[in-house]
């Protein structure tokens, strides 16, 4: 069963390598309640997405070190984190297909991905969020409602982040 899920994910990724955008046909529905799943971080510590509901909105990207679309998105994700990182939790779900925690750690050191990384070796969050492929981004508001999903290089996630982040902090 795990091999079938892995094959389906890889086929979805291969089909998306030329994607420049995505309509809401797959993945978790906008307007639905975000699943409260627990996934381990790269050191094996459990991270429960539900613990953030009521505290911070969430930016969740399903990604892999070998995903060219994810790498293309990285500068925009870094810029979004620089702007909103104090008000939004940035979570990177490594899909763990052809990955090891050590490989992911090396990638993070080299590329400075600006999110807390969870290593979804069992596909728990991937299934719960119905992630169709890597580069899949889900934005969840403070109340736990999904307000944006997208995939591909040309995603328009910055506007959704601005909405859930609230007003910019006043300069001192």
Image (cartoon, rainbow, N blue to C red):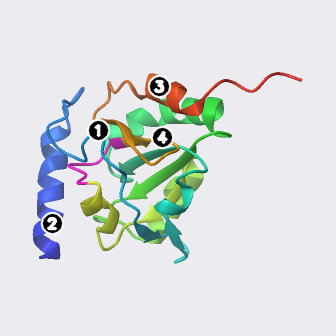
Q: Which residue is mark 2?
A: 5
Cα separation, mark 4 vs mark 1, equals 11 Å
Residue 133 located within the stretch drawn in magenta: yes
Counting residues from the N terminus, which is met first, the one under dot 2 or under dot 1?
A: 2
Cα separation, mark 4 vs mark 2, equals 29 Å
For this view, does 170 lie left or right of residue 61? right
Residue 68 located within the stretch drawn in magenta: no
Which residue is found at the position 37% from the left and 52% from the top?
34
Cα separation, mark 2 vs mark 3, equals 30 Å
- The tag on residue 30 is 1
Rendered location of residue 89, percent (x, y): 57, 47
Counting residues from the N terminus, which is met first, the one under dot 1 or under dot 3?
A: 1
Rendered location of residue 126, percent (x, y): 29, 60
Which numbered mark, 2 or 1, is in the foreground of this view? Answer: 1
Q: Are marks 2 and 1 in contact (CB under 8 Å)?
A: no
Pointer 3 local density, CA inside 10 Å: few below 14, some 14–19, many at least 20: some
Which residue is found at the position 12% from the left and 59% from the top?
8
Counting residues from the N terminus, which is met first, the one under dot 2 or under dot 3?
A: 2
Residue 41 in view of the camera: no
For this view, does 88 lie left or right of residue 9? right
In-front residue for pair 79/149: 149
Counting residues from the N terminus, which is met first, the one under dot 4 or under dot 1?
A: 1
- The tag on residue 158 is 3
In-front residue for pair 6/29: 29
For this view, does 170 lie left or right of residue 84? right
Q: Which residue is mark 4?
A: 141
Q: Which residues are magenta?
A: 130-137
Which numbered mark, 3 or 4, is in the foreground of this view? Answer: 4
């Amino acid at each position: 069963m795990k091999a079938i899920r892995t094959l389906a994910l890889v086929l979805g990724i291969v089909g998306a390598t030329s994607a420049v955008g995505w309509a809401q046909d797959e993945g978790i529905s906008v307007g639905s309640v975000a699943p409260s799943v627990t996934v381990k971080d790269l050191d094996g510590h459990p991270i429960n997405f539900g613990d953030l509901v009521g505290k911070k909105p969430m930016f969740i990207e399903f990604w892999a070190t070998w995903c060219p679309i994810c790498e293309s998105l990285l500068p925009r994700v870094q810029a979004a984190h620089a702007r909103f990182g104090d008000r939004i939790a940035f979570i990177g779900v490594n899909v763990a297909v052809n990955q090891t925690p050590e490989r992911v750690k090396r990638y993070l050191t080299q590329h400075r991905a600006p999110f807390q990384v969870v290593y979804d070796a069992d596909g728990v969050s991937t299934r719960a969020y119905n992630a169709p492929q890597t580069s899949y981004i889900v934005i969840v508001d403070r109340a736990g409602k999904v307000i944006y999903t997208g995939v591909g290089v040309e995603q328009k996630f910055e506007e959704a982040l601005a909405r859930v982040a609230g007003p910019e902090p006043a300069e001192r």
